[in-house]
Amino acid sequence: MSVQTPNLEPKGIQGLGKPIKRKEDARFIVGKGTYLDDINLPGMLYMALVHSPYAHAKILNIDASEALKIPGVKAVITAKDLAAAGLSWIPTLAGDKQMVLADGKVLYQYQEVAAVFAETRQAAADGAAAVQVEYEPLPVVVDPYKATDPDAPVLREDIKDKMEGAHGPRRHHNHIWNWSVGSKEETEKALAQSEVRIKQHMVYPRSHPAPLEPCGCIGDMNKATGRLTVYMTTQAPHAIRTVLSLVTGIPENNIRVISPDIGGGFGNKVPVYPGYVCAIVGSIVLGAPVKWVETRTENLTTTGFARDFHMDIEIGATKDGKVTAMKVYTLADHGAFDAAADPSKYPAGLFSICTGSYDFQKAYAEVDAVYTNKAPGGVAYRCSFRVTEASYLIERSMDVLAHELKMDPAELRLKNFIRPEQFPYPSALGWTYDSGDYEKTLKVALERIGYYELRKEQAEKRARGELMGIGISTFTEIVGAGPSKDFDILGIKMFDGAEIRVHPSGSAIVRAGTRHQGQGHETTWAQIVSEELGLDVDKIIVEEGDTDTAPYGLGTYASRSTPTAGGAMALAARRIREKAKKIAAHLLEVSENDVEWVDKKFVVKGVPSKSVTMNEVAFAAYTNPPPGLEPGLETTYYYDPPNLTFPHGAYVCVVDIDKGTGEVKVRRFVAIDDCGTIINPMIVEGQVHGGLTEGFAIAFMQEIAFDEQGNHLASNFTDYLLPTALETPRWETGHTVTPSPHHPLGAKGVGESPTVGSPAAFVNAVVDALAHLGVRHIDMPITREKVWRILRQSGIDSF
Amino acid sequence: MIPAAFEYKRPMSLEEAIDHLAKHGYDARVLAGGQSLIPAMRYRLAQPGVLVDINKLPNLSYLSEEGGMLRIGALVRDTDVEFNKDIQHRYHLISDVSMVVADPIVRYRGTVVGSLCHNDPSGDWAAAAIAARAQMVIKGKNGTRVEPIDQFLVDSFATSLGEGELAVEVRFPTPNALTSGAYEKIERKVGDYATAAAAVQLELNPDGTIKEAGIGITAVAHMPLRVVEGENLLRGQKPSMELIRAAAEEARKIADPTPDARGSAEYKKDMARVLVGRGLLKALNRLGVAVA
Amino acid sequence: MEITLNINGTEKKLNVEPRTLLVQAIRDAGLTGTHIGCDSSSCGVCTVVLDGKTAVKSCTMFAVQAEGHSITTIEGLAQGDKLHPLQQAFHDQHGLQCGYCTPGMIMAAYVLLQHNPNPSEEEIRFGLSGNLCRCTGYQNIVKAVQQAAQMLQQPTGAAADD
Ligand SMILES: Cc1cc2nc3c(=O)[nH]c(=O)nc-3n(C[C@H](O)[C@H](O)[C@H](O)COP(=O)(O)OP(=O)(O)OC[C@H]3O[C@@H](n4cnc5c(N)ncnc54)[C@H](O)[C@@H]3O)c2cc1C
Ligand code: FES
Ligand code: FES
């Protein structure tokens, strides 16, 4: 590589499987990205929010008089003002509704109580600090298991007598819904007949995606045109436009949502937050653009949390280790409003993938959701709608079972995998797995890490009193929601659109309804089009995020972009190619049937020397179209996937434990992923590194915890712990490739597999290190103290 | 978040700085590295009316050895210490600390003296200053005082600094060839304050017995503490595993931590013991003494 | 109050309050490559270089304090069209995804390489541990810094292969 000639642009036709460098980097490495806070409009005002110090309290009085005296402060609004506009409550994605600003009472600490608008950021902050609110504290519900006690305080006065919710009957004033799948009776029978049974309780703690860029929005109502432009950190601009239209009554054509460069999303930037609504209302009321950018505290305390699943599992098996049945009961803590971002028919998301990679004949899963005095959310944090919880549950449980059976956890898995010839595989809980080769992937991982030698080393170390552990996770994901027959959000089907416009000179602009936040769409979408159309990848520009120009789509989350928009992109390109073929035939002066697409050129069958390129065809499409054919070379394709895709992987982790402090050191971590066809291996590897790091963080550090009064204990980065380069292990990655049979490219999506699959590998490794001391399970995050407690209880001590 | 408004003073001489401080009393705060003060101001936990920025004061950036003391001026940054080869070679305890305070970027601004003045209950420098028996040099209207560190550190976030006073220097005794130390800290991640940490300094007699011992622990009480009984046990004795265990146990005994997200009181107390033990072993190891 | 800041070699006159954080002043001067990610001085996305050789979290310094110092931000690294080796290397090694941490990370790496022109992987991880990244898992950032170190040591010759 030459230093003198920096090469930012990949050249030529670069299709699938090429690790080409990213096109979007060019602006980011020189500091010229445009993130939300980089946008400033003339006459723009700033908004700051007032938050509740209490987790549950009646609001007696709000006095804004001191705030309004501060120079530069223009207005203060509360729920009363919003009520006038019909916006004091908004619908959530989960069929519930939520307060925008506290209406009569607050339901969680840091809840938004008032919004202050001012000419400067400083004045807005000073104004927010000067608003006086009088509260009368009420008893709080923090523990979800106590939420439905008969005498539990009523959280939601608004629906306390409504015993039917969006997802069926409610059995208590703090109960939201009950959801189940599978046959309880048959499963219980099969369990009763099983030779061996294990039961385990485990908690997937509340977590927060915490992208480094906080959420924010600029509302810009142009009173002259009646048009509302909203700049917003959103992963789903079109869905936001529709929701905004529904809640504000502004016709959808008069709303333009622009999602600029996004500094990480991970599910955090899917929902509609009160701050967005207030900024928009502020702009409408005050007639000026209003900017609101969250503080980190606001981000961690009020925007979409993830997980908080409290799970009980029972698994039956034969004595020689063949699984027979699984029964799961989960209590889901949804906070004060049910604002989970799941497809409407699936209040517990895709949790029913909990049978994982194994051939369970019988299964039953049931989830109850409850209200507590915590912020709402339940977002798919680098996860496809509760797959993370499901994966952790089954992968952790397989180790518990292996322990019970005194079987090697790798052997137990090999014995129970769904076999390649069983695909398409109908799972006991109703999914049809598209493809997979679980045994192969696990064997690659075991080989790579040297599993059997490590087991020997472990035995030797144990004999010397040293503690090391090996953990395995062989997860199956379910992504790409989804087929319109099953998947919608608020009625909007979860397809995705792609538009391709090939210009006369052979360059192109392509647009998608997705919105990347670092996943590299500007490169991978271009690669798909380059592959399908034979255009230079550097002549294809990718644009996402502006609802005025991009085709409709439900956005980027839940690893759905490649399975949905990626499919749309490929099919749009193929539609272009069909038309191009007609033009090629015209140029080659043969019939269309005599033209074939070979090596990214149109060639006359049997006459390889006679060919035209896509560039030539593009030119002709505008200068010399065949008679009778519509000129131009543009198309839009909406792809409704026939099924979901089921990426899988095998992860193996080795840990060493410090007997003095309880510290866990991850020595090695091998991740073999199978995400089907790989579009850009460099980008896929990067996604895996990032996802593993978040999985590591969840296993050992990240937790949104509360004290008994409902005080939030992780309101900033000194308490909500994100790993740095020093704590983060070095990742060893690899792949097997089992294409999806139904995706146009065979691709399955990968962005989230590592976050889904890795936590169980870490926990399994730690438990494995301590298993001989009688340890069967430790809940995440695995802190030093949890390990220390086990060590000291077992009489192990050391400096 | 945005700090509350304040009046900004940028004195160009020590006298001027002291004048400002004397005039505004407790409404004024010294701004040194700002790495504790500015975050507190952003959360509006601190709302000083006047900030006296000492960063432009001349002659406070010295890091020099004089009269058997390493003198660290009030504007010496953590990184000045961290990157100093001489300190790495001879001041083992100080060098250890300089690599684990806060994070590498914060260390470019944070000052050693500012950290001692802040006296955070989990401060790293204070534990080291206790173990190494450092002294503070303080200037005010009434002249200069030199005070042993134990006297300077008064309580949680409180020192003996009076109204109108400024700390200008901290002095660490220069270790001889038979002296070494170590700093053992456990933190949940880089940039976190210690869950528990221990600073130790040992001076040996030529016969291998311990001449003097210093042990400071932090994050395990309302403020950094000296493990007096542990030091007493070590003094005059020949190093042994048994002795180290006994001395470390003294740390556990006096630790009186507040339970929080970093750990229960029980855990932190035990960590005080483990880390003192490890520190003593490391210091001895650096002196070429292997303990069985 | 009116202050003059030297940012990337250009004197900028700015109107600030004493409480204006340096990062805000830099951004208000139109240089939005320097980002804000927290209030607790934890994330490092605001890292800029002061006087060519020390790094500072520009959210943890008041703008008035930067008078008389030279400030280098991500926008000041490239020489005309020629990227700085760190910028080139972050691109080559896929050391960025969303790009939000990237300017701060590059500025931190810039200072790290001044003090240690040939750092080991461990030293890079240590030196960059004041800067968070949520996307990359740091592995490719480490590789990028290694590549940049090599490029800087052979300013005219060939540098690392990918
Ligand atoms: C992310 C982060 C992590 C951190 N982690 C740690 C850690 O692990 N361990 C640790 O010990 N510290 C930690 N700190 C604090 C950091 O080390 C500070 O630099 C240090 O505590 C204070 O030094 P300063 O020079 O920045 O002081 P400032 O913030 O400027 O001042 C702190 C206080 O001391 C007073 N003061 C300062 N200098 C003087 C003086 N010369 N005379 C009189 N009064 C003075 C000030 O008025 C103020 O009240 C962390 C800080 C951050 C931002
Ligand atoms: S913005 Fe997070 S450290 Fe400066
Ligand atoms: S690239 Fe997104 S935070 Fe680092």
Image (cartoon, coloured by chain):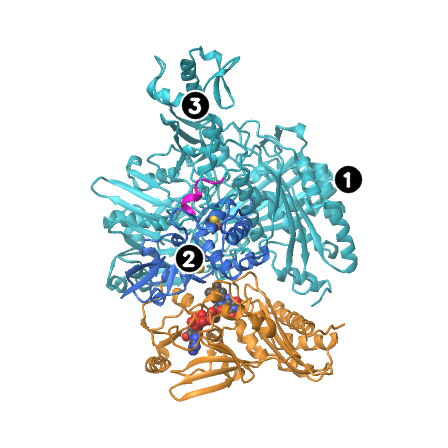
Q: CA distance from mark 3 to mark 1?
A: 60 Å
Foreground disc of the pair 2, 1: 2
Q: Which residues are magenta?
A: A21-28
| A372 vs A187: above or below | below
Q: Report the chain holding disc 2.
A: C
Do discs 3 and 1 share a chain?
yes
Q: Is residue A27 magenta?
A: yes
Depth check, front residue: A548 or C89: C89
The residue sitting at the bottom extreme is: B142
**Are the residues flagged by discs 2 and 1 in contact, CB closer than 8 Å?**
no
Residue at image position (32%, 70%) is: B6
Q: Which mark is residue A320?
A: 1
Chain letter, blue:
C
**Are the residues flagged by discs 3 and 2 in contact, CB closer than 8 Å?**
no
| A175 vs B17: above or below | above
Q: Secondary structure at mark 1?
A: loop
**Are the residues flagged by discs 3 and 1 in contact, CB closer than 8 Å?**
no
Foreground disc of the pair 3, 2: 3
The amino acid sitting under disc 2 is Cys
The residue sitting at the left extreme is: A224
- The reply to whether the residue tagged 2 has its Cβ within 8 angstroms of ligand 2 is yes
The amino acid sitting under disc 3 is Met
Q: Secondary structure at mark 3?
A: helix
Q: Which mark is residue C46?
A: 2
Q: Which mark is residue A614?
A: 3
Image coordinates for residue B247, horizontal then vertical, percent = 68, 77
Q: Neighbour class for label 2 at 10 Å: few (<14), some, many (≥20)?
A: many
Q: Report the chain holding disc 3.
A: A
Residue at image position (34%, 64%) is: C63
